Image (tube, helix red, strand yellow):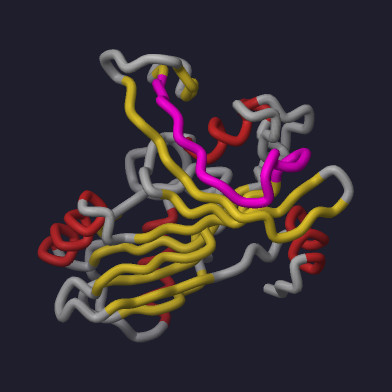
Amino acid sequence: MPELLYFDRDLVVLVKPVGLVSEDGDAGESVIPAAAAALSATGERETALYPIHRLDRNVGGVMVYARTKRAAAALSAFVQGGRLEKTYLALIHGVPAEPCGTYRDLLYKDARKNKTYVVSRMRKGVREAVLDYETLAATGDRTLVRVKLHTGRSHQIRVQFASRGTPLVGDGKYGAQDHEETIGLFSHSLTFPHPRDGSEMTFSALPGDELFADALRAAGLTP
């Protein structure tokens, strides 16, 4: 069941477990019914939950859902306007060329293969992708990095790191030799204005699974 970090009459912030999809209609079990059950268990009245952004099934972490259509419209506008800030923790193979920096690429998603590629020129279907990263700790041949997204392209973090020879741990789809059910990616924090009064809200969580345990300890972070 998802962990509820916050809820009010407009929205719900939760930690999505690995293995659940972000919205009804995607292939696989959705987190939405489980979130609704968790809300009901607190005595909250039952409401619809509207997805504002997505996480892949094999990625867990912080997400926000709207509870009304009005809140959904406002939160979606924040996403489009770059006012919903997302940071991730990524566990990668190898070490980035620099301890911190910006990755800027052109990405193309092949919908048939559900796979994204770095390409060299702009054409139909190609979109720019930008992220900042900061190295937090290294353990053996793995490095924990904090990633701030400036764009929200499909599989963006996965393909941008893989294209530089540092694929995410467990991400066989994008070049890692190990292929795990859980990949080394976690939605660490969200910051956004409240859709009703505009007050800034920040929520964060740390991954609790063993995949990240050594790296989190090395970085001085504990779930």
Snapshot quadrant of residue 199: bottom left
Using the rendered view, name the quadrant where residue 37 is placed: bottom left
Residue 195 image position (x, y, % from top left):
18, 71
**Residue 14 pos. (x, y %):** 44, 68
Q: Which residue is drawn at 73% across and 32% down?
A: 179
The one nearer the camera, 192 or 53, is: 192
Above or below, comparing residue 196 to residue 100 in the picture? below
68 with respect to 52 (left or right):
left
Residue furthest out toward the right: 140
Q: Residue at horizontal 45%, vertical 35%?
A: 104
What is the x, y in percent for residue 53? Answer: 34, 51
How many marks the image carries: the answer is 0
Vertical placement of 90 versus 68: above or below? above
Left or right for 108, reference 192: right
Quarter in which the C terminus is drawn: bottom right
In the displayed structure, 40 sits above or below 178; it is below
Question: Bounds of the magenta span?
Answer: 92-109
Q: Does the magenta stretch include residue 94?
A: yes
Nearest the viewer among 26 and 167 is 167
Image quadrant in which you'd find residue 50: bottom left
Residue in the picture at 47% in, 40% down:
28
Viewer-proximal residue, 34 or 93? Answer: 93
